[in-house]
């Protein structure tokens, strides 16, 4: 009887040890993910005649920046190849973007059906921009929002190996 209790205690100890290792590895993986893959906040600097936004290149060589659409937190992917701002269906729903006319779009993944919409407010850090047209792409996955040229045309864009700088000058 004593050996049976000892054997059960050893098995139980082994189970708890295994669970502890699994939890530990999961926590380390989460911390690594947050440290390396989370988008870094932009550096926003007021200059004498406008605003300069500096974005650090992410792990996958894209430029991502946290921000807000109509007050909803999103991650923007800067896409100089996109004509228009493209918004995922989940972000559009959360930001209560109106669904307007249907449109056929050409994306990197092929042809897709989308919906014209309008965005009242885009925030990047403390900088706010108003009134942009956009397209809701229902099957867009892995990205919240593509910042297309209808937004980026307001900026002069400079890029080096690790940074992209967007500068907007005050209109006088």
Image: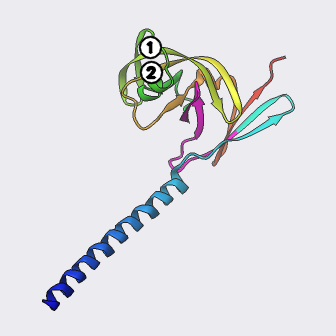
Looking at the image, is 45 positioned above or below residue 93?
below
Q: Which element carries disc 2, helix, strand or loop?
A: strand
Span highlighted in magenta in the image: 54-77
What residue does disc 2 label?
A: 136
Majority secondary structure in the magenta region: strand
Is 141 in front, or is 22? 22
Q: Position of residue 142 (x, y in %)?
A: 42, 38
Is 80 in front, or is 63? 63
Task: First in sequence, mark 1 or 2: give its number.
Answer: 1
Q: Which element carries disc 1, helix, strand or loop?
A: loop
What residue does disc 1 label?
A: 99
Is 32 in front, or is 96? 96
Is 67 in front, or is 116? 67
Q: For residue 161: magenta?
A: no
Quarter holding the N terminus is: bottom left
Horizontally, residue 28 falls left or right of residue 159, namely: left
How far apart, in angstroms, are the residues tagged by discs 1 and 2?
8 Å
Quarter holding the C terminus is: top right
> Are the two marked residues, 1 and 2, in contact with CB atoms closer than 8 angstroms?
yes
Nearer the observer, disc 1 or disc 2? 1
Q: Residue at x 41, y 25 (%)?
A: 89
Q: Residue at x 41, y 22 (%)?
A: 106
Q: For residue 67: magenta?
A: yes
């Amino acid at each position: 009887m004593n050996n049976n209790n000892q054997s059960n205690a050893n098995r139980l100890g082994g189970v708890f040890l295994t669970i502890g290792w699994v939890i530990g590895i999961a926590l380390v993986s989460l911390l690594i993910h947050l440290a390396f893959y989370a988008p870094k906040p932009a550096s926003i600097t007021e200059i004498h005649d406008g605003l300069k936004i500096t974005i650090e290149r992410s792990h996958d060589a894209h430029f991502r920046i946290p921000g807000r659409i109509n007050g909803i937190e999103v991650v923007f992917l800067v896409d100089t190849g996109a004509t228009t701002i493209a918004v995922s269906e989940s972000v559009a729903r959360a930001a209560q973007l109106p669904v307007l006319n249907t449109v056929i779009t050409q994306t990197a993944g092929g042809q897709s059906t989308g919906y014209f919409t309008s965005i009242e407010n885009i925030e990047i850090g403390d900088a706010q921009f108003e009134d942009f047209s956009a397209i809701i792409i229902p099957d867009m996955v892995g990205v919240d929002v593509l910042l297309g040229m209808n937004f980026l045309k307001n900026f002069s864009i400079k890029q080096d190996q690790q940074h992209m700088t967007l500068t907007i000058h005050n209109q006088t």
